[in-house]
Amino acid sequence: KLNNILFDSRTGKGLCIIDLDTIMPGLAANDFGDSIRFGAATAAEDEKNLDLVHFDISLYELYVKGYLEETKDVLTKEEIESLPWGARLMTLECGIRFLTDYLQGDTYFKTEYPEHNLVRARTQFRLVDEMEQCFDKMQEIVEYSVTSEPLNPLHRATHSECRSHPYEKVNPLLRATS
């Protein structure tokens, strides 16, 4: 993720990695998924206004294309197929971790106000909900980025289909706090 890199304020060039999770051995799905959780969101992780928080399928597509351009020859077929799952699961896991920390008194993540982790959890759950709505499209984008061939028409989803959801009516955790 970009926030794991220290950048030179004058040149904008990366200086060093500041979070060693970024370079330790692990699953491609986890690394990819955490990057998508951060990089394909339309708002900050702690945005209070959920109307601003969306999973942007276009940003996802750009990231997938760049990621697979560099990794498709070293990842296995199974690892590549796991990438959309990684995005959903890492986002859900992070939401659960934020919610758990909130419920346990904010002992793990640094917070700036009393409901900070609850706000963070809501943004992650919003993203997961939208990823679930777009999951066929997410899989299609990964497959097409590797094969460059048309895919199963049953997996076709439009960007607008990925964005129209009555969130607050479905999930009470997504309602704003009073």
Image: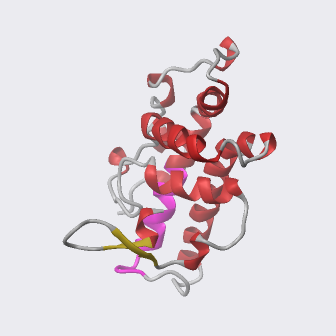
Residue furthest to the bottom in view is: 107
| Residue 31 at x, y percent in the picture | 62, 59
Q: Is residue 81 left or right of residue 109?
A: right
Q: By what rule are the colours in the image chosen?
A: secondary structure
Identify the residue at image location x=52%, y=51%: 36
Identify the residue at image location x=33%, y=47%: 52
Towards the viewer: 43 or 79: 79
Identify the residue at image location x=59%, y=64%: 94
* Residue 73 sits above or below residue 140 on the image: below
| Quarter of the view holding residue 64 | top right
* Residue 134 sits above or below residue 75 on the image: above
Q: Quadrant of the C terminus?
A: bottom left
Residue furthest to the left in view is: 10
Find out whether residue 122 is within the magenta segment: yes
| Residue 68 at x, y percent in the picture | 60, 42
Residue 170 visible: no
| Quarter of the view holding residue 14 | bottom left
Identify the residue at image location x=79%, y=45%: 76
* Residue 150 sits above or below residue 177 on the image: above
What are the residue bounds of the magenta stretch? Answer: 111-126
| Quarter of the view holding residue 150 | top right
